[in-house]
Amino acid sequence: MKAHELRSLSIEELKKRLSDEEENLANLRFQLATSQLESPITVRTVRRDIARLRTIIAEKQRSTPATPAVAAQPEKSDEKKA
């Protein structure tokens, strides 16, 4: 799937697709190890899809406003250092 198509999905959908692709990669690696995989190029394609998904998830998480944390105020000390 192209990156511009993935960007239209929500973060939850992207995470679901990521877990599916990671499972697919595990299966492909197993097939590769047992010499049942017809095209080893599919492993590379799935790895790139996983990287693309992780990148888009990170972009979306950075762009969504996080809940504002209460800024810790530095404590003022009445004592002066000598």
Image (cartoon, grey):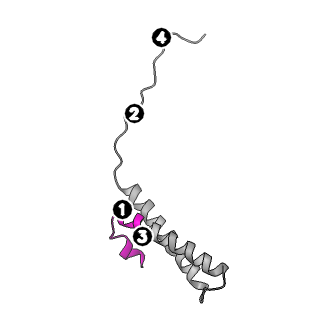
Q: Which residues are magenta?
A: 1-17
- According to the image, label 3 marks what residue? 17
The reply to whether residue 79 is in sight is yes
Is residue 7 highlighted in magenta? yes
Q: Earlier in the sequence, mark 1 or mark 2?
A: 1
Which label was assigned to residue 12?
A: 1
Which label sits in the foreground, 2 or 4? 2
Residue at the image point whose x is 54% and y is 11% from the top: 80
Residue nearest the observer in this picture, 1 or 71: 1
Secondary structure at badge 4 equals loop
| Identity, as a three-letter code, of the amino acid under mark 4 | Asp
- According to the image, label 4 marks what residue? 78
Q: x and y percent of residue 65 in the render?
A: 34, 51
Question: What separation in Å lies between label 1 and label 3 (alpha carbons)?
Answer: 9 Å
Main secondary structure of the magenta stretch: helix
Question: What separation in Å lies between label 3 and label 4 (alpha carbons)?
Answer: 56 Å
Secondary structure at badge 2 equals loop
Which label was assigned to residue 38?
A: none
Secondary structure at badge 1 equals helix
